[in-house]
Amino acid sequence: MNTMTSKQRVRLAFQHREPDRVPIYEQTVCSRIASELMGRPMHTGGGRIRWEETAARWESEQAWQDYARQLLQDVADLTRELDFDIVGIPWRHGAKPSEKLDDWTFRYDDRASGTWTIYHYDEASDVFDVVDSSVRREGIPAIERIVEAMEKGEEDAGVPTAADYAALHEVARRAGGSRALKSGEGFIMIPAESPWLAACAERPDLVERYLDVEMRAALAAIPHLPNFGIDILWAGGDLASTDGPLYSPAMFRRFILPRLQRITQAAHEAGLVYLFRTDGNIWSIAEDLLVNSGIDGYGEIDIDAGMDLADLKQRFPRLTLWGGMSCGQVLTFESPETIREKTRQVMEACKPGGGFIFGSSNAVHDGVPTRNFVAMLEAAREFGVYEAGAS
């Protein structure tokens, strides 16, 4: 029997105290797996929901509203069924397309910047992503127009209101219980595309202007978030591959670090914690990212890229870690028995002293067998219990 609420459990994890059990959370469970678990069609995560929502928006306003309503209900039902300790909204695609090129492909035009982007859904990989854009065709001139439009748009941006978090609160209400609420404010990254990375060297002023807009938006919003029940900034921004960061440590210190420091300071002043998410091998910038930035947690820990959790736990004891199970290799290809043993090992290494939230290394994606996900959850609940309860 649980002896505390999910919200209490997560709070203790960030305080590096031991709750009744290790909190469990997945930011994405693909729709196929959710459907198999729940015994009915579900819309919960993966590229499919971004494509489906885009198609619904193209069809009509009513179709979109109906789809969004069902998505929120499905996410709430899954959160309740799997008893996740954190509530969040899955990655959606909120923009309305300007043209439907075929059933799988949509074009988006941004009138403010005069740029366009084409997204395509690949059913085999369950990915809905950019396949062409003004930035890819033009490079820096398109980036310059985007940044100028963002700067002009700041004049019309206001502080967040309760309406901005209505969907999150609806999911939390339908899921039931007292769970920690997360939001994405404070997300800061250089887009991981060649033209943007070239701009870091050729037009660093442009990249800094872009990041300054992101930072100012976060700083304007963060002080208001406690009024809407937000507990965690689940933010960060992808900045590495398996081989290491996408740009040099010097560029990280120039572009990201000072802005991230201001964001985490604002979060702490508001009584919030900040968890930075990125895939890839970040060892070459670990001291700056995991210590000097002031972040409270680190997630999407890429075990397959050499980010060992036990090592991280020992070297950065003040960090709260989220993850533990390789979704690229172990969760996808190993047997349920192996996954059970891996889960036991992760818990043994990471749960002592708190500071740990268990989950996959990024997402429970479409390549994961449902039986493996179930084995992981069952093992996590068995091996994640603290003998002394809360400390």
Image: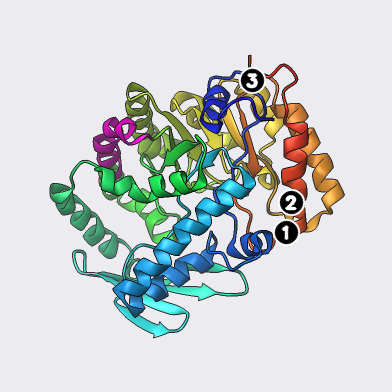
* Quadrant occupied by the C terminus: top right
The residue carrying mark 1 is: 370
Task: Establish if 204 lies above or below 120.
Answer: above
Magenta stretch bounds: 214-229
Q: Residue at x 72, y 44 (%)?
A: 377
Name the foreground residue: 33 vs 304: 33
Name the foreground residue: 47 vs 265: 47
Residue 89 in picture, x, y percent from top left: 45, 51
Task: Establish if 258 lies above or below 340.
Answer: above
The residue carrying mark 3 is: 18
Q: Quadrant of residue 197?
A: bottom left
Dot 3 crowding, Cα within 10 Å, few <14, some 14–19, many 20+: many
Circles 2 and 1: CB distance less than 8 Å?
A: yes
Would residue 365 be counted in the magenta stretch? no
Task: Establish if 119 lies above or below 17.
Answer: below
The residue carrying mark 2 is: 374
- Mark 1 vs 3, N-terminal side: 3
Callout 2, which amino acid? Val
Majority secondary structure in the magenta region: helix
